Image (spheres, coloured by chain):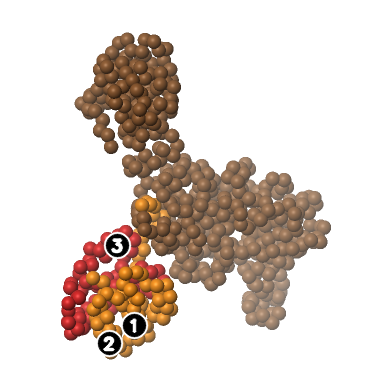
Chain colours: A red, B brown, C orange
Amino acid sequence: MADLEARGIPTVGVATTEFIQGAAAQAKSLGTDPALVFIPHPVQDRTDDELKQLADDHLEAILKLLVK
Amino acid sequence: MSELPRDGLVAVVKRDCPTCVLTAPVLGELARRAGITVYTQDDPSFPDTVPGPVDDLGLDISHRLAIEIVPTLIRLDAGHEVDRTYGWDRAEWERVAGIAGLGIDLPRSRPGCGAKNVEPGIIERLKIRFNETGLVSRRIAIGNDEDEYEAMYARGWSDGLPLVPPTEERVLRMLDGTSRDPREVLGLVPPDLAPATVEKIAINAVMAGCKPEQLPVVLAAVEAVLEESFAMHGVLATTMFVGPVVVVNGPIRRQIGMNAKGNALGQGNRANGAIGRALQLVIRNIGGGRPQEVDRATLGNPGKWTYCFAEDEEGSSWEPLSVERGIAPGKSAVTVFAGFGLQGVVDRKSRTPESLARSFAESLKTLFNVKSAPPCDAMLVVCPEHHRTFREAGWTKARLYEELYKLCEIPGEELVAGAKGIAEGGSASRIGTMVNKFRPGGLMIVRAGGDAGMFSGIIGGWSSSGPRGSVPITKEVKR
Amino acid sequence: MTVLLDPTSERSPTSRPRLPRPEGLDGLTIGILDIAKSRGDVFLRRLGERLGERGIAVRHYAKPTNTRPAPLPLAQRIATEVDLVIEGLSD
């Protein structure tokens, strides 16, 4: 993500809630402020329909971080 | 880290000190008669006269006890220091120890040696370790997996070229180059109008590659560009070419090894390059002024990396630029000028000052556009061989200025929009008048360059020059 | 670990602030980058479909492996082909 922003491309990352701590630690050590949307963990065992629903539910939150 | 005893005698010594060696038997005596904790700064087996000298090679205890001379003898009581002495003096040691008859075989007194913890380099590291540096800037930790040079690029601190990592140690050493308080604010840097403290400027000076002795020149240059009439915001934000150009006068040039001679406006000299670069980094990092953001320059010019040189004063029959601008002779000063590029003036044939002045004037008249008057201020950099022509003819600087202004008068009809088939130009109302290429005071002359070569140069200025734009500023360099 | 002093005015709470965002999405292309963790593809495809329904141009990319950063040619391609990126799915 930092690499793409460094190349001038605003980026939003999507991660599960499991990643919240890790993302904070990484941001602190790199001095970055990444735009992130968290979806409920777990993801691995979800059905296709559940994943599509999660995408629908979080689309707005993602787009909000891509525009002013 | 070792703990100090709450009560009793403490001594700090180093083997590499003849006086400490001299007092070794006395320390043994004190160990037997009263008990003593001896800390050693360099060799943990010294002195062998006491049962267990404590290793203070890390110098933590020495720093906490503020040791300056070894040997030092201290008496502690209930965790507080009640008495101390340094060097060897029998009466003093007997008083601090509260014991008579110490070191009767020794001479009455002997001076001590400098303690290891206050040696240059070491004192900085200790201050950093104990967080006593007085540096207030945010600390940025670069992890072991990250290359610190890439990290600085990633954080947007660079002008495009690599930076020297501004560690606490380097910044502390840089601040030794000035007696000014690191917290002193020199002004507010546009466009963000953020305070330029001596500390922040020192950080950028480290990154630029400056040596501590160059910092006072950087500080003077920053002071100068932050003068309101320099109009730094405008100079930064313009679509035109300019950036601050720094000319240095006075004894500081030699003291810090600046180049006023061969290739003075080119590469190769650390002081020239780093001072100009530090100024640019201050604008970028403290002020937040960056290309394609607030800096809207269409082309810019290579001088925006760095543009700083020393005037060639030695052997010149002309007064230095700083003196011309009101600084007392013999004082060091900087003049900053919103300028760009270098237009070469080649004249290998002129033998008279009149002819050479005409070469200069004809070149000056092309600045910006032949149809443009006045376009900007300008600085004429006269090389030594060209200066010789004026010196041998007895032309003072004032005489040359006078001649150039005269030669830069242009008939208004030549400047009218459309004249010479060029749409650029001015109003027809100027027909029948003479228009000067420069505003009064819009020209500056300095001497610089190698001794061989009949090549002078013109540094162009900014379209908004003078009272409604940017004026050159001269500031004395203060250590 | 190296500790550096911040040369900036420290107005930004972090050292590398986020890039400024565009006013809106009209006329822009969004890149969707799959970092190749399992099941992420289903989620990201659906995002792409929904964006397409809104008339927003979308391009899909995938990292060859989730264990390393995007290889240089991929990063360069993305940077030249899109205006914005959604990257996922980390867990």
Mark 3–mark 1 CB contact (< 8 Å) = no
Question: Pointer 1: what residue?
Answer: C60
Q: Is residue B455 above or below residue B426?
A: above
Q: Give me the C-alpha separation between circle 3 and circle 1.
A: 26 Å
Residue at image position (69%, 45%) is B314
Question: Pointer 3: what residue?
Answer: A26
Q: Give me the C-alpha separation between circle 2 and circle 1.
A: 11 Å
Mark 2 residue type: Glu
Q: Is residue C31 visible?
A: no
Percent of width and height locating residue B239: 52, 70
Percent of width and height locating residue B238: 51, 68
Q: Is residue B354 above or below residue B35?
A: below
Mark 1 residue type: His
In this rendering, the label closer to the viewer, 2 or 1? 1
Q: Closest to the observer: B435 or B68? A: B68
Percent of width and height locating residue B467: 55, 61
